[in-house]
């Protein structure tokens, strides 16, 4: 990576958590993911 890790310690982890949360919610409810986004943001 071009960026040093100490400058962005939780970026990859945060993105991974968001993707995992969206995937889990979609698999469990099998509904639209739209309503979940505003509540997370």
Image (cartoon, rainbow, N blue to C red):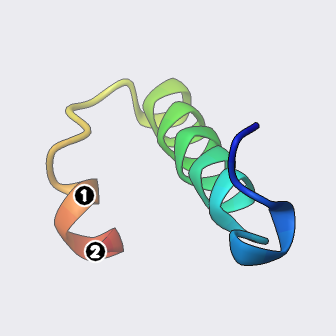
Looking at the image, which is closer to me, 20 or 3? 3
x 58%, y 51%: residue: 15
Residue 17 shown left or right of residue 41 in the figure: right
Element under disc 1: helix
Q: Are marks 2 and 1 in contact (CB under 8 Å)?
A: yes
Residue bearing mark 2? 41
Q: Is residue 27 above or below residue 8?
A: above
Looking at the image, which is closer to me, 16 or 37? 16
Rendering coords of residue 16 (x, y %): 67, 45
Position of the N terminus by quadrant = top right
Residue 19 shown left or right of residue 34 in the figure: right
The total number of labels drawn is 2
Q: Tag 2: Cα neighbours inside 10 Å, few (<14), some, or many (≥20)?
A: few
Position of the C terminus by quadrant = bottom left
Rendering coords of residue 8 (x, y %): 69, 69
Residue 5 shown left or right of residue 15 in the figure: right
Element under disc 2: loop
Q: Is residue 17 above or below residue 6?
A: above
Looking at the image, which is closer to me, 36 or 31? 36
x 47%, y 41%: residue: 22
Q: Real-space Cα distance between discs 2 and 1?
A: 6 Å
Looking at the image, which is closer to me, 13 or 6? 6
Q: Is residue 18 above or below residue 2?
A: below
Picture quadrant where residue 7 is located: bottom right
Rendering coords of residue 2 (x, y %): 70, 42
Residue bearing mark 1? 37
Picture quadrant where residue 23 is located: top right
Q: Is residue 41 above or below residue 25?
A: below
Please identify the residue farthest to the front as the structure is shown: 2
């Amino acid at each position: 990576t071009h960026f040093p890790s100490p400058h962005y310690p939780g970026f990859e982890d945060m993105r991974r958590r968001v993707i995992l949360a969206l995937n889990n919610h979609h698999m469990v409810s099998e509904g639209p993911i739209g309503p979940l986004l505003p509540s997370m943001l």
